[in-house]
Image (tube, rainbow, N blue to C red):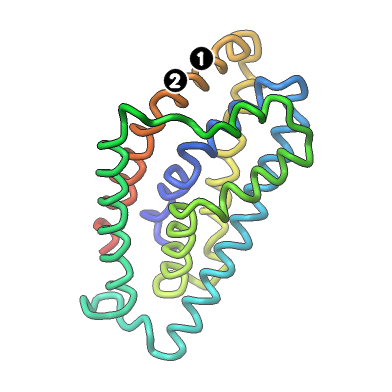
Amino acid sequence: MTLDVLPLSITMLAGPQIISAIIFTTAPRPYRLSGAFVAGVLISTVAGTAAAYGLATLMDLQGGLGDSSDRGSVGRIIQYALIALLAGLAVKNYLGRRTAEPPKWLGSLLTADAGRALRTGLLLIVLMPSDVLIMLTVGISLRTQGPGYLGVLPFLGAVLLIAALPLLAFTLFHPWMKAAMPRVRDWLNSHSWLVNILCCLLFILIILGGG
């Protein structure tokens, strides 16, 4: 896998994903809940990128993806479609910024158990359209530029690190982070529209840079 795909791991976990990770560090059992959440994220990402790679392989074997340098290839057309979709999402988030509210289910995570934390990690990846797009992009990149599916390991490592980052910070800087995490959580909640726009722009830049 080319290194320009690695920043997609940041885009993948920005938004409700990282907010959820922060919420779990402020819950009564932060290590158990955060561990379950990170496991759910990793399982979903492994499954999703494997499925995307399998789909890309099937399309490539049928001549569907074409040469990545060909602007008329299916792979390149998919990239153009992703850029258009992300630009539309960025505009939508900007226009709705004044009425944007965080999902109500985020508040209920403070009372979640380990099973709920695991399910949250699983579902946040596979049900988020932006994350599905990212995994599709990674799958195509692995097929057209990488050494096969094992090339996904750096990406998985980056996802794992970012998902666990709130817990690592909580562990290393416990006294300060215990007070700071709720403020970070509240800021991300109130500025979720801005986070979404930045993620869309980063994703677009990565696609254009790899083109």
Residue labelled with disc 1: 183
Residue that sits furthest to the front in the current view:
99
Residue 108 vs residue 47, the one in the foreground:
108
201 vs 57, left or right, is left
157 vs 194, left or right, is right
Residue labelled with disc 2: 187
Residue 100 vs residue 18, the one in the foreground:
100
Residue that sits furthest to the bottom in the current view:
62
Residue at screen point 47% across, 26% down: 189
Residue at screen point 48% across, 31% down: 102
Q: Image quadrant of residue 51? A: bottom right
Residue at screen point 42% across, 23% down: 190
Q: CA distance from mark 2 to mark 1?
A: 6 Å
Residue at screen point 46% across, 37% down: 15
Give the percent coordinates (x, y) of residue 124: 58, 47
Q: Image quadrant of residue 100? A: top left
Q: Are marks 2 and 1 in contact (CB under 8 Å)?
A: yes
Element marked by disc 1 = helix
Element marked by disc 2 = helix
Report crowding for label 1: few under 14, some 14 to 19, many 20 or more residues within 10 A (C-alpha). few
Given the image, on which type of amino acid does mark 1 rest? Answer: Arg
Q: Is residue 170 above or below residue 65?
A: above
Give the percent coordinates (x, y) of residue 68: 30, 75
74 vs 154, left or right, is left
Given the image, on which type of amino acid does mark 2 rest? Answer: Trp
Q: Is residue 60 above or below residue 49?
A: below
Report crowding for label 2: few under 14, some 14 to 19, many 20 or more residues within 10 A (C-alpha). few
Q: Is residue 24 above or below residue 9?
A: above
